[in-house]
Amino acid sequence: QVQLVESGGGLVQAGGSLRLSCAASSRTFSTYGVGWFRQAPGKEREFVAGISWRNTYYANSVKGRFTISRDNVKNTVYLQMTSLKPEDTAVYYCAATKTTAGLARAEYDYWGQGTQVTVSS
């Protein structure tokens, strides 16, 4: 069982930046694929970014603005978000899988509780 804890959310103005963190309880977290998803009110939870080993993947809507990375010593995955837009407002979740990080929610076995990101215009 892997426990994931997100942090770093908050309120930011459009054009600003935030860095989200996803800390894991597992010492083998470096071997997991990890994804960031988000869910805005009234919308489906959608894929944002994923990382497996050193391979990274991004949704088209965030490509060039968001960067996913990991610190294997700290068992933590980060999502650096820049040039934020009001449409980025959502609850952001990290998720982990023992296999390669994919775009579908069903591919992930473990989820965090989410952290709210609000971007004001």
Image (spheres, rainbow, N blue to C red):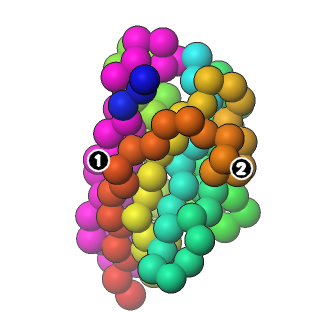
Using the image, determine if residue 114 lies above or below residue 87.
above
Where's residue 114, x and y in %? 36, 54
Kind of residue sitting beneath label 1: Ser
Pick whichever, 77 or 93, lies toward us: 93
Residue at point 42%, 26% (across, down): 2
Pick whichever, 113 or 61, lies toward us: 113
Disc 2 from disc 1: Cα separation: 22 Å
Characterize the local packing of mark 1: few (<14), some (14-19) or many (20 or more) Cα atoms within 10 angstroms: some
Asked if residue 85 shows in the view, the reply is no
Res. 77 image quadrant? top left
Using the image, determine if residue 105 lies above or below residue 91.
above
Where's residue 64, x and y in %? 64, 57
Q: Which is more N-terminal, label 1 or label 2? A: 1
Mark 2 and mark 1 residues within 8 Å of each other at the beta carbon: no
Q: Secondary structure at mark 2?
A: loop
Using the image, determine if residue 91 lies above or below residue 74.
below
Kind of residue sitting beneath label 2: Leu
Q: Nearer the viewer, mark 2 or mark 1?
A: 2
Is 76 left or right of 8, judged from the image as shown?
right
Residue at point 34%, 83% (across, down): 120
Is 71 left or right of 101, judged from the image as shown?
left
> Which mark identifies residue 7?
1
Residue at point 59%, 71% (across, down): 44
Q: Which residues are magenta?
A: 4-30
What is the residue that sits farthest to the bottom in this orientation?
Answer: 121
> Which mark identifies residue 103?
2
